[in-house]
Image: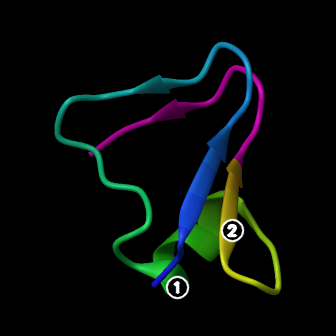
């Protein structure tokens, strides 16, 4: 499981959305470092 997530500017996370709970799913939509830090880019909307 990821230890942290970095959210860049203008990121919107919907109330029921999840980040950091499923590393394989996060790899599909976000940048993930070798040390499992998830980076959500500028202006991204994270949906449930």
Whether 43 is among the magenta residues is yes
Helix, strand or loop status at disc 2: strand
30, above or below 48, in the image: below
Q: On the picture, is 31 further left or further right than 21? A: right
Is 6 in front, or is 19? 6
Q: Residue at x 64, y 74 (%)?
A: 27
Whether 9 is among the magenta residues is no
How far, Cα to Cα, is label 2 from label 1? 13 Å
Label 1 belongs to which residue?
24
Q: Quadrant of residue 40?
A: top right
Q: Residue at x 63, y 29 (%)?
A: 44
Helix, strand or loop status at disc 1: helix
Q: In which quadrant of the rendered image does the N terminus lie?
A: bottom left
Is 28 in front, or is 10? 10
Q: Which residues are magenta?
A: 40-48
Report x, y in % for residue 23. 50, 81
Report x, y in % for residue 10. 65, 13
Q: On the picture, is 4 further left or further right than 6? A: left
Would you call the spot at circle 1 few (<14 residues within 10 Å), some (14-19), or many (20 or more)?
few
The first of marks 2 and 1 along the sequence is 1
Q: Quadrant of residue 47?
A: top left
* Residue 37, numbered label: 2
Instruction: Mark 2 vs mark 1: give the one in front.
Output: 2
Would you call the spot at circle 2 few (<14 residues within 10 Å), some (14-19), or many (20 or more)?
some
Q: Main secondary structure of the magenta part?
A: loop
């Amino acid at each position: 499981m990821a230890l942290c997530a970095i959210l860049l500017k203008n990121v919107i996370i919907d109330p029921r959305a999840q980040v950091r709970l499923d590393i394989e799913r996060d790899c599909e939509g976000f940048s993930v470092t070798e040390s499992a830090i998830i980076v959500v880019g500028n202006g991204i909307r994270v949906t449930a």
